Amino acid sequence: MSNNKIIIDCDPGHDDAMAIFLALGNSNIELLAVTTVVGNQTLDKVTHNARAIMEFVSANDIPIAAGCSRPLVRTIQTAPEVHGTTGLDGTHLPEPKLPIDQRHAVDLIIDTLKSHPPKTITLVPIGGLTNIALAVRKAPEIVELVKEVVLMGGGYHTGNRTAVAEFNILIDPEAAHIVFNETWPITMIGLDLTHQARPDDQIMETIAALNTPVSDFVVESLNYYTAGYRRRNGYTDHAPVHDLCAVAYVIDPSIMETIKAPIDIELQGALTTGMTVTDFRHPAKADCHTQVATKLDNPKLWDMFIASLKQLAK
Ligand code: BDR
Ligand code: CA
């Protein structure tokens, strides 16, 4: 059995789907639960997508629970310009039949943590942090139970939704503030890192050549996602597959370089709300519990992903 037990909290989303495939196809990961949160699309749509993705690769025994349908304080912001009106536009998954766990995502997260030995489960949030914040408010004792929080969100240099704020943090900055101010170890895999996580034409051809239902889905999905990035941002290369990086780090932390640094969330900026303010002024103190990812081994990421896709096709 794998050493890396994880819970993915997500808002699928094209890159969320890739992160789920990577986890399911890698023998170093045991995916214990998938929880959903409003983000790329409304809660009902991202939950439908999570069920469809899991059923598509026959992951029928892993609980999926729906979480928060709105942020803690702010109004809902979704990302149809990135992921379309369904959250997975450009793809064609069958209507899912997989049942939804009757618990709220927050309760599934807490129950899963409490039913395993302490510090054996990594939380992998790849959407807004609403569910994780509520879980730790409902059951503060989970801070000591979690092995690590490895999240996709933020960035110490630049934003995407605003000049300095990344989408997952911006949509619920109060939740992010709660999560970053708990003492659990946090690895922030932000835009500085994920903007390095781009396939190239050759990688896309290698995926297409697998010629399986899942590889066909990946190609359709990433082609749609990249077309949007190119249209909006004037990119000529492929779009960064952000969420994939968080799972890759859990599988093999040597895939990226990290630096310990204090991080806090801007809540009241006129221009900077949702910024993950990272303090690089001094070497981090011994009790610093946050680190940021800086440099990615991108070829290794895609080798890892393609290996998972092959495994899922068996
Ligand atoms: C993040 O925002 C979402 O659109 C993606 O799924 C990813 O989690 C990137 O900023
Ligand atoms: Ca996401």
Image (cartoon, rainbow, N blue to C red):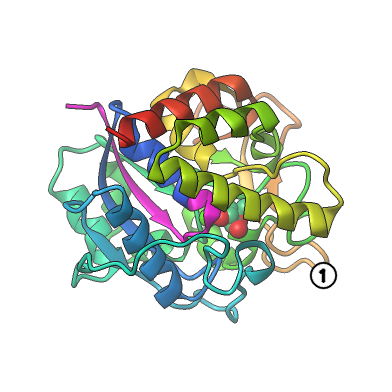
In front of the other: 297 or 269: 297
Residue 314, image x, y percentages: 27, 32
Q: Would you say residue 61 is visible in this rendering?
A: yes
Total labels drawn:
1
Q: Residue 164 in magenta?
A: no
| Residue 8 magenta-highlighted | yes
User: Quadrant of the rendered structure where residue 261 is?
Assistant: top right
Above or below, 198 against 125 in this view is above
Q: Amino acid at mark 1?
A: Ala
Q: Residue at x 44, y 57 (%)?
A: 10
- Outermost residue to the bottom: 75
Q: Position of residue 34 (x, y in %)?
A: 31, 55
The quarter of the image holding the N terminus is top left
Question: What's drawn in magenta, residue-wise?
Answer: 1-16
Q: Is residue 185 left or right of residue 190?
A: left
Q: Nearer the viewer, residue 288 or 54?
A: 54
In the foreground, 282 or 138 = 138
Q: Farthest residue in the right direction?
A: 234
Label 1: element kind: loop
- In the displayed structure image, the side of residue 61 where residue 171 appears, left or right: right
Q: Image point 72% across, 69% down: which residue?
A: 268
Name the residue rendered at 54%, 58% in the picture.
176
Q: Is residue 191 above or below residue 292?
A: below
Residue at image location 70% in from the left, 39% down from the top: 195
Is any atom of residue 163 visible in this view? no
